Image (cartoon, grey):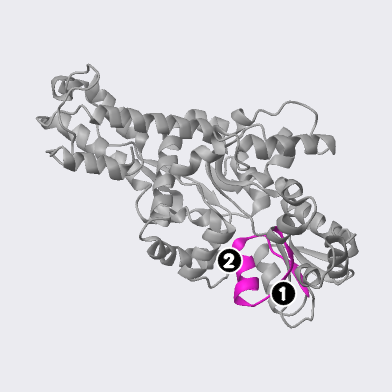
Amino acid sequence: MSIKSLNANINRRNLMKLGLLGGVAVGGLPPLARIATAQDLPSTELEKVSVRWGSLPSTNQAWVVLGSRKGFLEDVGISMANGVPKIVQEPQAIAQVNNDELDICGHYFGGIIQALNRVDNIRPFFCYSYFQGRTILSPPDAGIKSVEEFLNEGMSWSEAANAAMAQIKGQQFAIMNAPSVLPWINLALEQGGLKLEDTEAIPLEDPRVVQLALSGQVNFASPAGAVQIYQLQHQAGWKSLIDMPLMVESMPEGKAALSDFLHYDLIMCTEDYLNGNTETIYRATTAMFRTLDYMFGPDRMTAYSEYAPFINAANGSNLDAEAIRYIFDVMDPFFPFSDQEVIWENADSPLYYKNIYEPQIQRLIENGTLPDRTYDLDKMFVAKSIFEDLREMKKSSEAILAKVDDSLEGEKLAVVEAAVQHFKNFNYYDSDRLLRSVHG
């Protein structure tokens, strides 16, 4: 049952006392007003916890700032140290979590998978989107012809790719300085028979890639972040030489060849932090689901307007709400709570975690990047079990609320009122915990 339908049931049953469900016993359980004594009831106040929270400076990462600024984290007892996430670059993210400089940090699995044998303590506990915007760009006035243009002239894929990529040979080429971006760049160049060393590659942080490109110092650039791609391609009018959607549609291997570049965006901690702060991780996850609900709900453009100053400050960009909407809708599809089953349980979906990562791991073993051993995705992705737990807690909360007696009063009423509010806020962890204390 959705929150909307739960509220509909509340209204339909003429609930009293701040939206509690009526006292009809269901399934043989007695009405809740007759269960639990005041001394059995827990406090409705949540423990206050400050979390050292980090984020990559990417549009599809730094949105977590809204969870802090809108009070969604505060409602589950969590505050971000300094009130906002600490912006870190991709190469530092895992190190700062492992070295106990950060408790929690955003990342994406493409930055983890090639080092699985060395990151045994890293645990992604929340997975929420994937990126599909890889591209190589050139200025609009450089006279560069794209693979697509050559295809439209009647060339085969191989002919078009060779003709287009010949233009980048020996040219200065600004790319993001991160190992995770190289596999796709190499694949794109290989379509024209080139390697990265056939260009004058300049590895930089993503904002510097844009600065160098806009200053006219390079004719080719491949930024990795959606912000930087948007700046060059959609604001400055840079032209795509080759990109992922075109490769999926036109290259012979299509989706199969590009499956190696599909990766979840995620929030991670160490296993040590998870084991010592389990309640915090559950609550942080629920606050992030609530934040996504805000970002993709009826007030989404307001959310993006609130988000824009922070992401612009982190990147030196000038995105507005419409630009962020485009990035989220086109480049970075998200998985809110209602869509999490697609990645964790729908084995027929190309987005199912095992369909993505088991073949990738096998190829990394075959090419010598990873040692030949077993890599337990279920152990790594605690996000799967946390989602499944929260889904069960949601069902349990709904079942208990269906039995609440409208004569509840005093401390028991206060506990159920608090549980209902947590439920509405996606905090099924505390709604279930509080309701079970009343249920007995």
Mark 2 crowd level (few <14, some 14–19, many ≥20, 10 Å Cα): many
Mark 1 crowd level (few <14, some 14–19, many ≥20, 10 Å Cα): many
Tell me, yes or no, whether the highlighted magenta stretch contains residue 224: yes
C-alpha distance separating marks 1 and 2 = 15 Å
> For the residue labelled by badge 2, is the local secondary structure a helix, a strand or a loop?
helix
| Residue for point 57% across, 31% down | 271
Residue 245's image quarter? bottom right
Q: Residue furthest bottom?
A: 141
| Residue for point 86% across, 57% down | 190
User: Please, what is the three-letter code of the amino acid marked with disc 2?
Assistant: Asn
Residue at label 1?
A: 213
Which of the pair 326/249 is nearer the observer? 249
Residue 248's image quarter? bottom right
Tell me, yes or no, whether the highlighted magenta stretch contains residue 181: no
Residue 255 position in % (x across, y down): 72, 49
Task: Report the side of 62 relative to 233 (left or right).
Answer: left
Number of callouts: 2
Residue 175's image quarter? bottom right
| Residue for point 80% across, 31% down | 371
Residue at label 2?
A: 315
> Does any portion of residue 99 appear in the rendered image?
no
Task: Report the side of 225 relative to 421 (left or right).
Answer: right
